[in-house]
Every structure is written in C-alpha cells, then in structure tokens.
Amino acid sequence: MAHLLSTSCPLKVASGCKLNSKPLSCDLVAFRTSSLSLQTSKSRFRMLVSNSERSKRNYTTHATTLPTSWQASNEPDTNFRQSSSEHSKPKRVLVIGGDGYCGWATALHLSNKGYEVAIVDSLVRRLFDHQLGLDSLTPITSIHNRIRCWKSLTGKTIELYIGDVCDFEFLSETFKSFEPNAVVHFGEQRSAPFSMIDRSRAVFTQNNNVIGTLNVLFAIKEFSEDCHLVKLGTMGEYGTPNIDIEEGYISITHNGRTDTLPYPKQASSFYHLSKVHDSNNIAFTCKAWGIRATDLNQGVVYGVRTDETEMHEELYNRFDYDGIFGTALNRFCVQAAVGHPLTVYGKGGQTRGYLDIRDTVQCVELAIANPANPGEFRVFNQFTEQFSVNELAALVTKAGEKVGIDVQTMSVPNPRVEAEEHYYNAKHTKLIELGLKPHLLSDSLLDSLLNFAIQFKDRVDIKQIMPSVSWRKIGVKTRTVAA
Ligand SMILES: NC(=O)c1ccc[n+]([C@@H]2O[C@H](COP(=O)([O-])OP(=O)(O)OC[C@H]3O[C@@H](n4cnc5c(N)ncnc54)[C@H](O)[C@@H]3O)[C@@H](O)[C@H]2O)c1
C-alpha cells in the first residue's frame, strides 16, 4: 500500500486569484497550481496555505473556458422535460463537484440536453489523490482541458468556478454571477474509508460536507430563493435495518397515534454521518425558509462511460479502484483484469443498492426537470438493483470466464463495522415514476466494463487494491499507511 500521507486539517484548496463577479476566459485565469502544492517534510505533506493565510485569501479561482453567451444554435433538447410549472422550469444549473466522477458525467449530460451549466469545484479530490498516492484507472485531463474539449466538440459552453463551497464569499459571488435555477450538489468528500483514516480526516469530512451544504442553503436563501437544490445523499444513511427501507419517510403507529416521520438513519462512518447531518439541515431549511430540495439517496455507482464522456478521450471520466475511493463493482473489474483476487470483505453478504453511471445522470436530470415545490423536502432512493458483495463477485467471475480470465475470490478481514449477513429491501419507485429507464447490470455491460479495465490494466497500482483503513483502529494521530 502506498503511503497515505498525513495532512494538516482542515485541508483547503486555496488560490490567490482575486474574486471576480463575472467568469473569466480560461486562458486568462491564473489558476495557481501552487495553491494545490504540498511540501514534503519528514515524509509528511502539508498544505502551503496556512489557516491564517486562508482567512485572508482562501478563494477564488473563478473561471470559464469561453465567453458565457449562450450559443443560439444550442436549442434545448426536445426531450427536455416539463416541470410542474413553467415558471419553475430550470435552465441554469450549477453543478457543485462537477470535476468528480458523478459530477463530470452529469455536467456534460445536462449541457448536452440544453441546460446552461456551470461547474463549481475546489479540485480537492485531485489533491486527495496526490496526497494518498492514488490515481484514476483512466487518464483524466485537467478540468480546463475537459471543458475546452467539450466546447470544441459540441459548441456548448460550460462555465467554471474554481473554489470551495465552504468559503461563503466565493459561493456568494458564484451565485450572484451565475444566478442558478437549480443547484446539483455533488461537492463533498465522499469516501467512507477516507473519513475513517484518522481524526483529521474525520473532522475534514464533516467540516467540508456539513458546512459546504449549509453554505449552499444560505446562498439559496440569500440570492436565489426559488432555486431547487438537488443534493446527493447516500443509501448508506439508512444503514441495514431489519425492515423495508422506504423513500425518506415512514408512517408509524405508536400507542394508538400515527404519524409520517423521517425514516430512521443508522449511518456507519463519519462520512455517512455527514450525509445524515446534511439531510437534517436541508429538511429544516425547507420547513423554516421554504427552500425546495430533493435529497437523492444514491446507491453505489458503477460504470464509466456515458454518451458524452465517450465522445473524446479528453472527456474520459475518472475510474477509482483503490481501497479508499474504489467502489465495489468497479474495483472488482480492475482486480479481475490484473489477476488480483476479488477482495470480499468478511462474509460478503453485505447487500446494497447499485446503479449505472448512465442512470445517475438520468436521475439528476429527472429531478431538476421536475422540481420539488417550495418548502418541500423530497427524498428519492436512487438505485436500480440490489446485490450482495458475493453476488457481484460471482457475476465478475462469470464475465471473466467469457474473456478467458480465471477470476479468484478471497475473503479479507472486514475493515468496516457492519452486518455481513442481513435483510435488505429498499424501495426505489419514485424516480421510475418520473420516467427513469434503468440500465440494468447485464452480461454485456459487465463484459464491456471488464474489457475497459483490461484496456487500462497497465495503469493499475496493485499496492492500492487492498483495504488499508480499519474502522476500529482509527485514532487521533495523523496516520500514514505504510506501503
Ligand atoms: N460514487 C458513488 O458511488 C456514490 C454513491 C453514493 C453517493 N455518492 C455521492 O455523490 C457525490 C459525488 O460523488 P463522486 O463519486 O462523484 O465523488 P468525487 O470525489 O469523484 O467528486 C466529488 C467532487 O467534489 C469536489 N469537492 C469536494 N468538496 C468540495 C468543496 N468543499 N467545494 C467544492 N468542491 C468540492 C471534489 O473536488 C470532487 O471533484 C458525493 O456527494 C457522494 O457522496 C456517490
């Protein structure tokens, strides 16, 4: 396992660029990569920007690759769905976390469908990769190149605001400049193992996620009251109760009285807990301020290709396979491709909801095209099928046989604290009712995912595959995981 490098906390991406009220041409933007740079000291990496510096100049590269004018030729797609009222039909969508796995695919998809899209991203995820010595299986180019490439292929502009949503001044300027009708918020630290490395990563995760979302709520209240928030939550918020999981709410009769209440949450990592806090804050502000919000409790996402990302190699999405950020099916395909046994944690009966990344982008589009009403806190369970880890391993083994790979499976001690055999039945009908046409995990998809992993297998760092973070061993000491 490569070194998991210690960091000072809170981690911050800062830039020295001055705050601009209008997006700049990318070519003019002096995005200071030094703001992302780290210094090595006794095998530690530290952010160059200290907290005191941060308070003075903790933002903002604010950029767009191209002039912001909407291209006359870019007529909205005819499939553009009608929202419940013409008045609230969203056109301008701010995608927070738009440089990430789900966010990049979604930003392209929405742009392709005729929405005006702006991406907000602090690029902190690229920083985590540098710090931990990780890399995407697929080579991914800079966000600036990605957006330029999209423009040159399609003529469509995606604006870019580089900054941290925990920085309210940056976020305020972004809202005032872009004036979104909808915000899709993917911009969080999203790995449970990352949040369980040590105290500083736990604190970073909760600070980044909870404060970032709180800032988004305040920005909507202050600058864009009618804006619909589409927030990415996770099915992991519910845990694995021994009853069916409903979509957000459950009706309970207790001592002769009945009420419909938020479904109980049993999060199992500091990351999942940050999502529960987010959900509570969003629900409260819907009630108190009349904000309209949709919480998408997403299952585990697999796959890498969407119609848009496969248009050009500079549009490739990231594909994580390591023990920190790699999600189950993607990781198994890479393990099979390099002849590494599939790593099943514990008994392998852990069952979760899964979905294809093509359905992630479809679900988000459906949510923004059919917005929640003012004051409504709507919850959708966003997944299409359930699998246990053992079932996934069996599917990948079968797919391996077809391409002549002998896939082995090994059980490794479970680094997490979770039930390894349990009841699991989660409802997921609301997005289907809105028109979701799921891409179910078919043999052909698995074949292509496996072939994709084989295509890039020379880029795999085998040392990153095994789990390296234990839920039980987390301590206060900033942790370096030895290779
Ligand atoms: N990938 C999955 O399987 C999955 C499953 C369930 C839920 N989700 C949720 O979907 C969202 C996106 O996940 P992903 O897999 O695309 O993650 P990712 O790490 O690939 O992308 C997250 C992006 O957000 C950015 N970001 C993080 N904190 C930020 C901040 N404070 N300000 C601005 N930008 C910030 C990162 O730089 C990164 O580009 C997350 O909220 C995650 O919890 C993902």
Image (cartoon, rainbow, N blue to C red):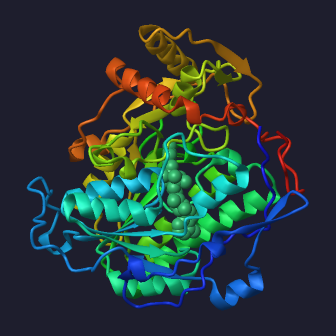
Tally the numbered discs: 0
The reply, left or right, for residue 45 in relation to residue 437 is: right
Q: What residue appears at the point 62 percent right and 12 percent down from the top-left corner?
A: 408
Q: Is residue 217 visible?
A: yes
Q: Quadrant of the N terminus?
A: top right
Q: Is residue 398 above or below residue 157?
A: above
Q: Is residue 142 above or below residue 132?
A: below
Q: Is residue 253 visible?
A: no
x, y percentage for residue 243?
52, 32
Hey, which quadrant is residue 114 in on the image? bottom left
x, y percentage for residue 102?
43, 51
Q: Quadrant of the C terminus?
A: top right
x, y percentage for residue 82?
13, 60
The reply, left or right, for residue 178 in relation to residue 479 is: left
Q: What residue appears at the point 46 percent right and 86 percent down from the top-left corner?
A: 172
> Observer-nearest residue: 207 or 319?
319
Q: What residue appears at the point 28 percent right and 67 percent down from the top-left corner?
A: 373
x, y percentage for residue 38?
74, 67
> Observer-nearest residue: 41 or 379?
41
